[in-house]
Amino acid sequence: LVYLLGVARTPSAVHHAGAVHSYPNLKSFYVDSCATIHVCNRREWFDTLDTSLSPSANAVAEGPTQAEGIGTLRFCPTSTDGSVVPIVLTNVWYIPKNPFNLLSYSAAEDAGMDIDLKKRRVSLGQYDFDIIKTGNKLYLWGEADMIAAVRPRVPRDRADWQLFKSIFAEL
């Protein structure tokens, strides 16, 4: 299934994590309860990008932030049952100077996702996804969630976290 604003589009696009080879460019986002928009700092992640649009918004720490475009991108996290589920994020602002990629909690819920930070879980349609608490109220959702999904589910321990950090060392 491909989810576009929470609506299933094509049933043939779901793969099982066991059959998926490692991605050369794994995507990850911090789930941000204060953000009103999705933000991505990697141009190559966009499927479409309209650079004629350059809105600005107030950032928490530094005042206005200028986007260099708005577009869509495909994000493919692994569900707790091992399915790699393509999700199309729309109206994503391209802000290359932003230090983190952000998934807006409110925009995601408006699109049909159910996010429970206490349980570290995102639900969309029939799928549930684990998110990782990385520190002081920071929650990371990435395509490498398959660490726990491709083997019997176990609580995320220090070894899983170290492996995840090594995959996303660029963050």
Image: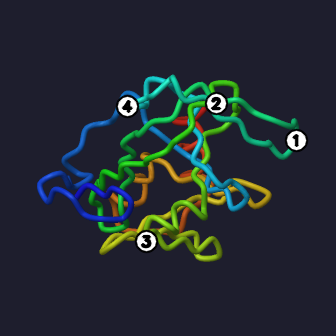
The first of marks 4 and 3 along the sequence is 4
* Rendered residue at 43%/47% (across/down): 90
Mark closer to the chain start, 4 or 1: 4
Residue 131, percent from left and from top? 54, 61
Residue topped by disc 1: 61
The kind of residue tagged 4 is Thr
User: Mark 2: which amino acid?
Assistant: Ala
3D distance between C-alphas at marks 4 and 3: 25 Å
Instruction: Choose mark 1 or mark 3, whichever is in front.
Output: 1
Residue at 39 percent across and 45 percent down: it is 75
CB-based contact (under 8 Å), mark 4 and mark 2 = no
Q: Mark 1 and mark 3: span between their CA atoms?
A: 30 Å
Sequence-wise, which precedes: disc 1 or disc 2? Answer: 1
Q: Quadrant of residue 73?
A: top left
Would you say 79 lies left or right of 1 here?
right
Q: CA distance from mark 3 to mark 2?
A: 29 Å
Residue ID for mark 3: 123
Q: Helix or strand or loop: what does disc 2 sit on?
A: loop
Q: Amino acid at mark 3?
A: Ser
The residue at which mark 4 appears reads as: 48
**Where does the image place residue 65, in percent across and percent down from the top left?**
75, 33
Q: Is residue 102 above or below residue 54?
A: below
Residue 59 position, x and y percent, is: 80, 42
Location of mark 2 (residue): 67
Density class for disc 3 (Cα within 10 Å; few <14, some 14-19, many ≥20) is some
Q: Secondary structure at mark 3?
A: strand
Which residue is depicted at the point 44% across and 24% down?
A: 44
- CA gap, disc 4 and disc 2: 15 Å
Q: Disc 1 vs disc 2: Cβ atoms closer than 8 Å?
A: no
Q: Coloring scheme of the render?
A: rainbow
